Amino acid sequence: MKRVFCCVALACLAPVAASPALAQAWPNKPIRWISPFAPGGGADITSRAITAKLTPVLGQQVVVENRGGAGGMVGTELAAKAPADGYTLLIGTIGPIAINPSLHSKMPYDPIRDFTPITQAANALNVLVVHPSLPVKSVKDLMALAKARPKDLTYGSSGSGAADHLAGELFNSLLKVKMVHVPYKGGAPAMLDLVSGNIQLVFSTVSTALGSIKANRVRALAMAGTQRFELMPELPTMAEAGLKGFEVNNWYGVFAPTGTPREIISRLNGEIVKILAMPDVKARLLDSGIAAASSTPDAFAAYIRSETDKWARVIKEAGIKVE
């Protein structure tokens, strides 16, 4: 009887002991952190802010690898096909994860099937800015003008299918109007044309627009996401300014290939969430117009599903396709 009791006790303890053993064994070599965009952008800035703190915590070098191309799909595909062993991570963004599946008829990966979410990491804050010559002082003024003369309004974006393009299409959808979209090869060229008066408005990233706002070359009307910008606290969100249902969060999150052990996912979530709450990390991101954010893996997965469904509806209604 004593022997049976001991065997049962050991069997019960075995699963408990397995998790710490795995956690202690990982990591024992450097970790590759793929950023699917060029250096210097929001995904890269967020990646380096996190990995600078994650490296000493894990005791292994976490190396940021910039693999840009195809709107983020090249690097994202690379991460999707990596071994699910905890040694490849991805900074995923709204484009390649939640928007591109509705823009492209063929995708080299499935964002839901091929990745396990670890945590949301940040939101690149977007702001609605207009040329000073436009006779509007508020979002309600712009809404009235758009309903009266929608085809006279042109809005720029960093490219067809980008978050700032879809922000304009969401505006169109909610108001049942049709402003004219003018795509550029990046947010900076769009901002230059706005300053020049060649277009009337842009849903720009704060980092791109801030200099022109401070110099009074463009007029800021509202923040495009769910939160105000600490450096311009007087600026309302679009919803606060009168356009209910308007929400564009240009988010970043951390992912691992599907199949990565749950113990590793939990460890990474805990460490990264703590890092994102550090005042110096939050300040470093905010200087670039990026707001730190975090979540549980399950909450982030649910958010991704809701974002995917939301933008699929906007894309279908606008008839957007990028091949």
Image (spheres, rainbow, N blue to C red):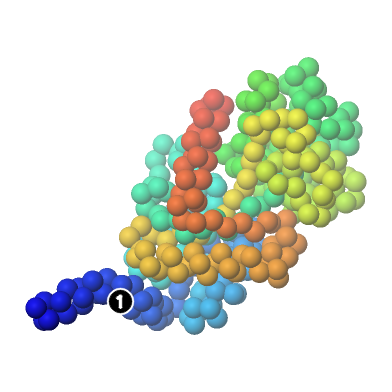
Q: In front: 122, or 151?
A: 122
Image coords of residue 304 (percent x, y):
49, 46
Q: Is residue 88 visible?
A: no
How crowded is the residue under tag 1: few (<14 C-alpha within 10 Å), some, or many (20+)? few
Q: What residue is rendered at 57% in x and 27% in y?
A: 318
Picture quadrant of residue 224 = top right
Count of labels in the image: 1
Name of the residue lying farthest toward the left: 1
Please, is residue 25 above or below residue 294 in the view? below
| Label 1 element class | helix
Image coords of residue 192 (percent x, y):
79, 45
Compared across the picture, whether 36 is left or right of 257 comes to right
- Residue type highlighted by circle 1: Ala
Q: Is residue 92 visible?
A: yes
Compared across the picture, whether 286 is left or right of 258 comes to right
Please, is residue 222 above or below residue 209 in the view? above
Image coords of residue 205 (percent x, y):
71, 49
Compared across the picture, whether 241 is left or right of 121 comes to right
Q: What residue is rendered at 70% in x and 70% in y?
A: 280
Q: In front: 161, or 119?
A: 119
Q: What residue is rendered at 42% in x and 48% in y?
A: 111
Please, is residue 273 above or below residue 320 in the view? below
Please, is residue 49 above or below residue 321 in the view? below
Q: In front: 108, or 13?
A: 13
Name of the residue lying farthest toward the top: 148
User: Badge 1 is on which residue?
Assistant: 17
Image coords of residue 215 (percent x, y):
90, 50
Q: What residue is rendered at 43% in x and 65% in y?
A: 266
Quarter the N terminus occupies: bottom left
